[in-house]
């Protein structure tokens, strides 16, 4: 069954809103390089398709937080939470910067969470496209129901056999290694975990192990 999910606007952390206000007032220099995402967002993602999201209007020097979702028969986003792949999206308007919030994606393998700022002084339209797959990302337990709970430490439960993976991605020509694994705390409580550059993130789900 295809699932259809709408993008959702969320509140922006006060620190980010303050930074945007300072930039708008000219108190801070604007970034010279604009973040347009990955030039090859589908690279390495099985049966990938780019799903373009609806355009969102922004006022000049405005910051918004949004959650976007892969849908239909390609419901999985291979992002940082479950595949160690941040920036698996693309947008083309150079007025905008986009920051992916990997921690906010835990608990949902179809979600891209971003903070977006329009640095131009006039109103602009923002459109983003997500790299989506029909296959779940490697650290996601397909038979688990997400509880949308996450922690930034190891829960300390036994690791489910054959779930530990060491993967890598390249940043600036340098390979960065990260680790994925699943822990089982009780008969039906699991934690999907990742360790990336010293940051541990785990999200809970209920179900049965394969």
Image (tube, rainbow, N blue to C red):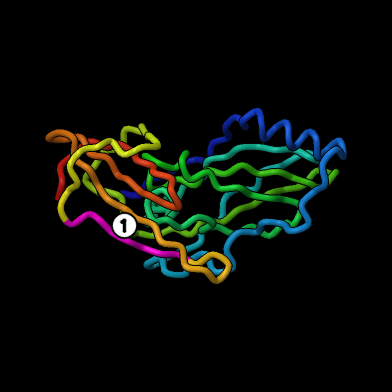
In the displayed structure, does residue 94 sit left or right of residue 164? right
Compared to residue 111, the image places residue 204 above or below, namely above
Indicate whether residue 113 is drawn in magenta: no
Element under disc 1: loop
Count of numbered labels shown in the rendering? 1
- Would you say residue 163 sits in the magenta stretch? yes
User: Which residue is label 1 attached to?
Assistant: 138
Determine the residue located farthest toward the left in the rendered image.
187
Indicate left or right for 210 with 155 as reference. left
Would you identify the image quadrant in which residue 4 lies? Answer: top left
What percent of the width, then of the height, locates residue 13?
Answer: 61, 30
The picture places residue 118, in percent across and down from the top left corner, at 74, 45
- In this view, 4 is above or below 49: above
User: In the depicted view, which residue is nearer to us: 93 or 104?
Assistant: 104
Single out the residue that lies furthest toward the front: 198
**Can you say whether 159 is above or below 42 in the image?**
above
Q: Which residues are magenta?
A: 162-169
Q: Is residue 124 left or right of residue 190?
A: right
Q: Residue at x 32, y 53 (%)?
A: 180
Which residue sits at x=31%, y=39%? 154
Residue 76 coordinates in the image, percent (x, y):
39, 53
Asked whether the viewer can see residue 51, the reply is: no
Q: Quadrant of residue 35?
A: bottom right
Q: Residues within 10 Å of mark 1 (few under 14, many from 20)?
A: some
User: Image point 65% across, 59% down: which residue?
Assistant: 36
Give percent across and percent down for residue 117.
Answer: 70, 43
């Amino acid at each position: 069954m295809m699932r259809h999910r709408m993008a959702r606007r969320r509140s922006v952390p006060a620190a980010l809103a303050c930074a945007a206000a300072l930039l708008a007032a000219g108190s801070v220099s604007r970034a010279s390089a604009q973040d347009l995402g990955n030039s090859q967002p589908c690279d390495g993602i099985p049966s990938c398709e780019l799903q373009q999201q609806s355009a969102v209007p922004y006022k000049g020097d405005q910051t918004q937080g949004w959650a976007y979702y892969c849908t239909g028969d390609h419901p999985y986003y291979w992002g940082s939470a479950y595949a160690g792949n941040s920036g698996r999206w693309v947008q083309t308007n150079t007025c905008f910067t986009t920051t992916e919030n990997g921690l906010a994606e835990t608990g949902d393998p179809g979600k891209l969470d971003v903070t977006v700022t329009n640095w131009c002084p006039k109103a602009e339209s923002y459109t983003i496209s997500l790299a989506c797959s029909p296959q779940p990302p490697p650290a996601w337990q397909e038979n688990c129901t997400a509880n949308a709970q996450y922690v930034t430490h190891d829960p300390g439960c036994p690791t489910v056999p054959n779930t530990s993976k060491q993967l890598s991605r390249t940043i600036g020509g340098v390979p960065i290694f990260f680790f994925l694994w699943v822990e089982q705390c009780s008969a039906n409580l699991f934690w999907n975990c990742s360790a990336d550059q010293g940051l541990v993130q785990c999200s809970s789900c209920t179900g049965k192990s394969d």
